[in-house]
């Protein structure tokens, strides 16, 4: 299952979430530049339990290096697929959590989840000499917060069936529940950092996110946070949308809807629409012309039902205008 996006639209552009993604990518690009010293670089800035439990090892590191590793380990990654998976998950779930908490509370929340995941891993792997790196623990905290804040949201998920892409919306509580169960089973069945995956860091981060998000919601927001929200209000809707369609028995046509913002309705836009009809699913590229009013119907010729005589009906998409602010 590959998550593509959630159905809960954030009202503001996720400034902090975007900066976190950018920082992770920049640090990832710096890593190969260390050349032969890359392993030493990872050992210095990664979280290595043995550095804190074995005096002979800890003697080789300064107090600053020991403390800084609790921050730097969250921005290192072990390879392209490692950072791609982490950043994609952060992109999908982080914007909504930031939207609820505000940028500054979200940043504190993210870092606290990362530290909690690191401490959880450290305590359960006290003498492990293997460096733990990656944003997975902090992102697990974001996912835990998402589960608590948006349990009834739906996750648009790609499921390849016999090389055919099938798009399905899965309830967030089910998607994240299965994800957490897999992490817990992986942690229970592994020794230390089995398979190079810090399972317990994921479990600890997820639990921390659930506990911390309600605490952070009670922390007062600053006036600066309010001004940032005003400046970052979104003026667009998601590019990829799901459009369940309906029909009538004697009607060859299909009927659905596409959602745009007032600005998109005025200027025009393009959307990728995942059309679902029964067990069928396909993705269409739809052009929304400018200066449309709410309720306007777009006609897509030949994309309706296949008739007995070989002809096809049409697909009609009603334009819904939603103010994201």
Image (cartoon, rainbow, N blue to C red):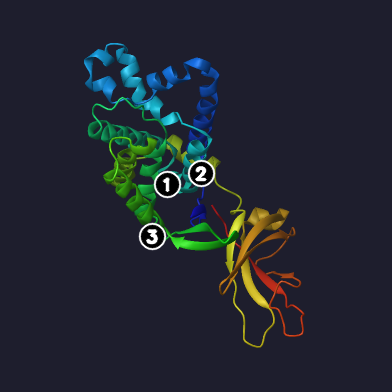
Q: Position of residue 312 (x, y in %)?
A: 74, 77
The residue tagged 3 is 174
Please determine whether, in this image, residue 146 is positioned above or below residue 75. below
Camera-near label (1 vs 2) is: 2
Q: Is residue 196 left or right of residue 261?
A: left
Q: Earlier in the sequence, mark 1 or mark 2?
A: 2
Q: Residue at 28% across / 15% down in the picture?
A: 57
Q: Residue at 50% across / 50% down in the picture?
A: 10
Q: Position of residue 206 (x, y in %)?
A: 33, 45
Would residue 53 be seen by someone viewing this image from the given angle? yes
Q: Is residue 45 left or right of residue 85?
A: left
Between 97 and 46, the one lying in front of the other is: 46
Q: Secondary structure at mark 2?
A: helix
Please determine whether, in this image, residue 46 is positioned above or below residue 232. above
- Find residue 97 and name its label: 1
Whether pointer 3 and pointer 1 mark residues with C-beta atoms closer than 8 Å, the reply is: no
Examine the image and state in which quarter residue 48 appears: top left
Q: Is residue 194 left or right of residue 286?
A: left
Would residue 222 be seen by someone viewing this image from the given angle? no
Q: Position of residue 251 (x, y in %)?
A: 67, 84
- Find residue 20 and name its label: none
Q: Residue at 34% across / 47% down in the picture?
A: 183
Please determine whether, in this image, residue 286 is positioned above or below residue 316. above
Dot 3 crowding, Cα within 10 Å, few <14, some 14–19, many 20+: some
Between 82 and 102, the one lying in front of the other is: 82
Q: Secondary structure at mark 3?
A: helix
Disc 3 to disc 2, C-alpha distance: 19 Å
The residue tagged 2 is 88
Disc 3 to disc 1, C-alpha distance: 18 Å
Disc 1 to disc 2, C-alpha distance: 15 Å
């Amino acid at each position: 299952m590959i998550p593509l996006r959630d159905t809960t639209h954030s009202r503001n552009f996720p400034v902090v979430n975007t900066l976190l993604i950018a920082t992770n990518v920049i640090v990832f690009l710096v890593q190969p530049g260390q050349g032969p010293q890359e392993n030493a670089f990872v050992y210095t800035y990664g979280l290595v339990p043995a550095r804190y439990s074995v005096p002979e090892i800890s003697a080789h590191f300064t107090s600053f290096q020991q403390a800084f590793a609790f921050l730097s380990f969250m921005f290192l990654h072990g390879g392209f697929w490692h950072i791609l998976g982490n950043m994609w998950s952060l992109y999908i779930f982080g914007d909504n959590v930031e939207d609820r908490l505000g940028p500054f509370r979200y940043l504190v929340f993210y870092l606290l989840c990362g530290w909690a995941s690191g401490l959880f891993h450290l305590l359960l792997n006290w003498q492990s000499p293997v460096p733990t790196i990656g944003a997975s623990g902090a992102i697990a905290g974001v996912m835990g917060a998402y589960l608590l804040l948006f349990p009834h949201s739906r996750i648009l998920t790609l499921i390849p069936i016999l090389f055919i892409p099938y798009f399905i919306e899965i309830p967030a509580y089910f998607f994240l529940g299965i994800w957490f169960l897999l992490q817990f089973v992986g942690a229970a069945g592994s020794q230390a950092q089995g398979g190079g995956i810090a399972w317990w860091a994921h479990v600890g981060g997820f639990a921390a996110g659930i506990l911390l998000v309600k605490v952070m919601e009670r922390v007062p927001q600053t006036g600066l946070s309010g001004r940032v929200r005003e400046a970052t209000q979104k003026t667009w809707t998601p590019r990829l949308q799901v459009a369940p369609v309906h029909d009538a028995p004697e009607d060859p046509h299909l009927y659905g809807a596409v959602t745009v913002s007032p600005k998109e309705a005025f200027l025009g836009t393009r959307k990728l629409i995942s059309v679902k009809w029964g067990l069928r699913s396909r993705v269409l590229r739809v052009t929304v012309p400018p200066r449309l009013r709410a309720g306007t119907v777009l006609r897509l010729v030949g994309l309706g039902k296949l008739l007995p005589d070989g002809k096809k009906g049409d697909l009609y998409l009603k334009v819904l205008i939603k103010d994201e602010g």
